[in-house]
Amino acid sequence: LSDEFCQQHLHEDYAELARYAIAALSRKRPSPLRSGRPNTWVCGVIYALGQVNFLFDKDSNPHMSAADLCAHFNIATSTGSAKARQINKALGMDRFDFTWALPEVIDHFSMYWMIQVNGLLVDAREMPHEIQEEAFERGMIPYVHADRGKSQAQLAKRKKTLARYDLYRQINAEQQSRIVADIINEEALEIALRIGLLQTPKELAEKSIDELVPALDLALYATDGEGSSILARELEAWPKTLNQNERIMFEAMSHSLFSIFEVVGKHEIAGLVMRDLFSDEELWVVDRGLEANAPDGLKIAIRLINPGEFWMSTGGNVILDENMLEEIRQAFPVERGQHPHPDRLAEFVFKSHFARSHND
């Protein structure tokens, strides 16, 4: 809905910001998107982004009134405004945060570039390169203005990378969904009871697919004694008419990696640099939601797949505190550079997570 509206009435930069905002809202726990109509949420997201980017200012290009925006989505202006306030609060979105600003707004809104140097308020764009670099590293300015040409080249590559990621994400979701219906009442149910996600079989009917993801993760990706998973066997049985991108995702999903990772920092093109705490290997991970929400130093148990030049997430994940990390170290005392069996690691993490949830 947001893509369609932005393409018809705004532009691609608005569409990209809207996707980021929706991804960030989706990853909230609990996500506010679980209630309410999609068109109301989309209107609220664009309304909130419009406030940051002067959409309602007649001198802006593009320009649209709040009333026209809400009318397009068949909601009252007061409803759109209220939903925008809810989104602003959830995402910390305001006019002085360049995270949600359009490139052209960042370039021309001087407030995004004002920093203090020796107690004086100055425009970072007029300062030496090393000061710009330090301000950027501290998150005080959007980018190093002195390297603006380079940033534009990276932006182009970023858009290309994210477009490929979106395509792979769609294929990944479709391939998993085709299998889930056949396993949810047997394999997934048994695993959900085993890891403590469910206490009784009757609870299955009360859970959404999203809530069952940890059990589905193990049901789909865990391997048997011969090293084969349900997902791999199902995919192999599909007709040989898969296109190239579908085959790439098929291969990636058949060789997934579940491990414990630390977010090292942002990747220069798109996504995050994450370090496997068992192997010490650093991976480039593209994930819209994680990029928007994961701080440096975050420890997370997550399943990754590699469809090409980057890695991406699939299945379940658990954010880890120091107590859980210590439990994992004690349960899997492997030497540095070695890796525990991913199925046993995943089951341990999920079981420990739900045990803690029930105790809380």
Image (cartoon, rainbow, N blue to C red):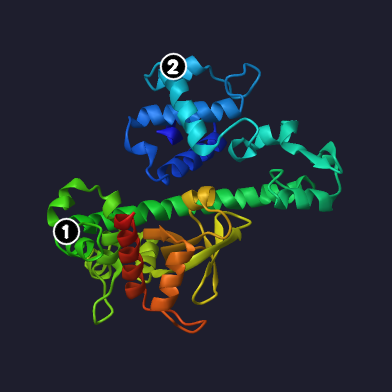
63 on left or right of 278: right
Give the number of the disc on residue 222.
none
Q: Is residue 9 visible?
A: no
- Residue pictured at 47% horizontal, 32% vertical: 87
The earlier-in-sequence mark between 1 and 2 is 2
| Residue 314 x, y percent position in the rendering | 38, 59
Give the number of the disc on residue 78.
2
- Residue pictured at 45% horizontal, 60% vertical: 312
Asked if 268 appears above or below 118 in the picture, the reply is below
SS at mark 2 in the image: helix
| Residue 143 x, y percent position in the rendering | 71, 46
- Residue pictured at 63% horizontal, 36% vertical: 97
SS at mark 1 in the image: helix
Instruction: Bin the neighbour count of mark 2 within 10 Å (Cα to Cα): few under 14, some 14-19, many 20 and up.
Output: few
Asked if 50 appears above or below 34 in the picture, the reply is above
The label nearer to you, 1 versus 2, is 2
Residue picked out by circle 1: 182
Instruction: Bin the neighbour count of mark 1 within 10 Å (Cα to Cα): few under 14, some 14-19, many 20 and up.
Output: few
Q: Report how many numbered discs are placed on residues in the image.
A: 2
Q: Is residue 285 visible?
A: yes
Asked if 169 appears above or below 88 in the picture, the reply is below
Residue 269 appears in which quarter of the rendering? bottom right
Quadrant location of the C terminus in the rendered image: bottom left
Outermost residue on the left side: it is 202
Q: Label 2 is placed on what type of residue?
A: Ser
Asked if 326 appears above or below 82 in the picture, the reply is below
Q: Label 1 is placed on what type of residue?
A: Asp
- Please tell me which residue lies in front, 250 or 138: 138
Residues tagged 1 and 2 counted as in contact (Cβ below 8 A) = no
- Residue pictured at 34% horizontal, 65% vertical: 352
| Residue 271 x, y percent position in the rendering | 55, 55
Residue 199 appears in which quarter of the rendering? bottom left
